């Protein structure tokens, strides 16, 4: 389902579900991140739901709170991301301890061409959410992501594009989400 006409990257609050038909399968990327086969199979069969809250904290910083859910899998506590490009360390149940940093950028500030594709006019105007994720050791893999509102098959959708670098492999993934309503 498309996002509401007024939704932009200035407020991505809502409940979303991954659209498996429009998204790339995550299994290979999860394998390169060291996720066990049984968990990869379970994730491939299940549907990921994300509840996002987009807000400003007491210091006036732009923030995203993300709660990811898969029926039958414990993905841990919600993630709180401050869009200030300061590294944050988080223990995840799926891929271990990761270091993330997040900020808002204009599309022309993104280096990887794949991460710049398919964005709506308002996303080009207001900017993307740029996310960098790597394991705590920062040596085995890394992922650079852009999040925003994209044009997919003529519909406005929440989209995440990922440039993943793993052991001897580079992947490009697109995750497209159905909008399920307000949280």
Image (cartoon, helix red, strand yellow):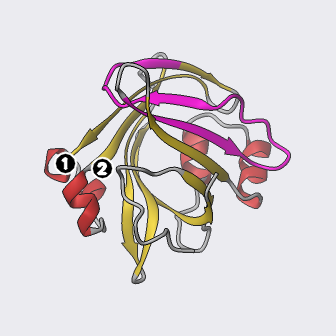
Residue bearing the label numbered 2:
128
Q: Residues within 10 Å of mark 1 (few under 14, many from 20)?
A: some
Residue displayed at 28% across by 59% down: 123
Q: Quadrant of residue 109?
A: top left
Q: Position of residue 106 (x, y in %)?
A: 19, 48
Residue displayed at 79% across by 51% down: 42
Mark 2 secondary-structure assignment: strand
Q: Position of residue 4 (x, y in %)?
A: 48, 69
How many numbered marks, from 0 up?
A: 2
- What is the number of the mark on residue 106? 1
Task: Decide whether residue 81 is among the magenta residues.
Answer: yes
Query: What is the span of residues highlighted in magenta in the rendered image?
Result: 62-89
Considering every residue shown, the one lying at the far left of the view is 108
Residue displayed at 79% across by 36% down: 74
Considering every residue shown, the one lying at the far bottom of the view is 154
- Residue 173 seen in render: no
Task: Decide whether residue 25 is among the magenta residues.
Answer: no
Q: Quadrant of residue 86?
A: top left
Q: Is residue 121 left or right of residue 153?
A: left
Residue displayed at 57% across by 30% down: 79
Answer whether labels 2 and 1 touch (C-beta < 8 Å). Answer: yes
Q: Determine whether 164 is above or below 135 in the image.
A: below
């Amino acid at each position: 389902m498309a996002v509401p006409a007024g939704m932009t990257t200035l407020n991505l609050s809502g409940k979303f579900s991954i659209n498996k038909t429009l998204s790339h399968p995550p299994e290979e990327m999860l394998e390169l991140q060291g996720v066990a086969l049984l968990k990869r199979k379970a994730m491939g069969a299940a549907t990921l739901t994300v509840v996002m809250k987009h807000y400003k904290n007491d210091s006036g910083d732009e923030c995203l709170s993300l709660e990811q859910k898969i029926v039958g899998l414990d993905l841990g506590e919600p993630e709180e991301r401050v869009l200030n490009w300061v590294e944050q360390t988080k223990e995840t149940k799926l891929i271990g301890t990761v270091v993330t940093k997040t900020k808002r950028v204009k599309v022309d500030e993104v280096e990887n061409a794949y991460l710049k594709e398919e964005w709506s006019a308002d996303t080009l105007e207001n900017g993307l959410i740029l996310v960098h994720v790597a394991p705590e050791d920062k040596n085995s893999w890394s992922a650079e992501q852009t999040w925003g509102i994209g044009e997919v098959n003529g519909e406005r959708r929440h989209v995440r594009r990922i440039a993943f670098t793993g052991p001897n492999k580079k992947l490009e993934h697109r995750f497209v989400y159905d909008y399920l309503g307000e949280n």
